[in-house]
Image: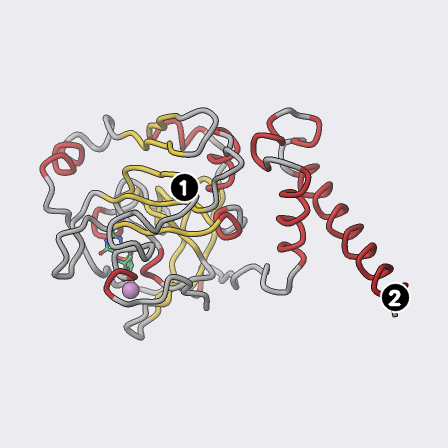
Amino acid sequence: MPTNKFGRRRLVAGAAGAVGAGLLGGCDRLSNNAQAENVLGSAARLSQWAQRLLSPKQVLAREYTEADLSPYFKPNGSQDPDDDDYQALADKNFVDWKLDVGGLVQRPAQFSLADLRAMPARTQITRHDCVEGWSCIGKWKGVQLGRVLRQVGLQPKARYVVFRCADQGPGSSATKYYESIDLHAAFHPQTILAYEMNDQVLPVAHGAPVRVRVERQLGYKMAKYLMRIQLVESFGDIEGGRGGYWEDEGYAWYAGI
Ligand SMILES: Nc1nc2c(c(=O)[nH]1)N[C@H]1C(S)=C(S)[C@@H](COP(=O)(O)O)O[C@H]1N2
Ligand SMILES: [Mo]
């Protein structure tokens, strides 16, 4: 019946609004802040975003304890980028490294390692699943990507976050490794830019100085050797057009687990 339908829609809208308000309340009190508009673009966008968070898919990946840590965490893909600029940065312990954040943002910015370390950190012990069929449990510390994005502010057209890496990638492609995720994954609380692994500075083999953790997706989404983050409306005109290094070779763009 139409009245039921209307009632249900009102309920969903109300619930989405409540979650939106709750989230903003928890996120540095953005609700009282003009920055909220920059991040979320518009009220319509807020409802859409909040509603997605209500969906059963928006759950945390399981977190483990120290006792579960894998004694050996297998490095995979590139393990020491064959790139002169990267090697020069590595030689100086990445003090000159800067993460460039640009594209469809309000305030393009560069973040040094010190800048990222000065932001509130999140630590999580999670299981990494590679599409090749192996898994390892590791402990990661870093800054939530959502915090970085809130700091630069998104333009309303921004839909995807593209990660650009220093390495050429292990396959036959001449493309540098890159990846992309949507804003839903980008603002997931466990999506972090990790600079520590198992209480150590992130080793080169695992993506120093900073690698992405997107805990509800497969390993190939978790870009290592991060150099640049681009906010885009579409990834169709980037490299092979399928949203990532392995995606351009045929892997699925959405690698949810
Ligand atoms: N820059 C870059 N990131 C990358 C890769 C790569 O080759 N280059 N390999 C991916 C794959 S397939 C996996 S399983 C993980 C491996 O991360 P690890 O080396 O920490 O195990 O990194 C992912 N991120
Ligand atoms: Mo992988």
Asked whether 226 or 204 is in front, the reply is: 226
Report if the beta carbon of the residue with label 1 is closer than 8 angstroms to ligand 1: no
- x and y, in percent, of residue 156 in the image: 53, 36
* Residue 247 horizontal side relative to residue 191, left or right: left
* Residue 29 horizontal side relative to residue 242, left or right: right
* Residue 110 horizontal side relative to residue 32, left or right: left
Question: Residue sitting at 57 percent across and 30 percent down?
Answer: 38
Q: Quadrant of ligand 1?
A: bottom left
- x and y, in percent, of residue 100 in the image: 33, 31
Q: Secondary structure at mark 2?
A: helix
Q: Residue furthest right?
A: 3
What's the image's color scheme?
secondary structure
Q: Secondary structure at mark 1?
A: strand
- 82 versus 12 height, above or below: above
- Residue wearing tag 2: 4
Picture quarter with the N terminus: bottom right
Question: Residue sitting at 40 percent across and 43 percent down?
Answer: 193
- x and y, in percent, of residue 183 in the image: 50, 47
Q: For the residues marked 2 and 1, what is the alpha-carbon distance in whole angstroms?
A: 39 Å
- Give residue 28's mark: none
- Residue wearing tag 1: 232
Report if the beta carbon of the residue with label 2 is closer than 8 angstroms to ligand 2: no
Sequence order check, earlier mark of 2 and 1: 2
Mark 2, Cα crowd under 10 Å, few <14 / some 14-19 / many 20+, is few
Mark 1, Cα crowd under 10 Å, few <14 / some 14-19 / many 20+, is many
**Which kind of residue does numbered mark 2 sit on?**
Asn
- 219 versus 88 height, above or below: below
**Which kind of residue does numbered mark 1 sit on?**
Val
Residue 72 in view here: no
- 29 versus 60 height, above or below: above
- x and y, in percent, of residue 34 in the image: 64, 24
Residue 52 in view here: yes
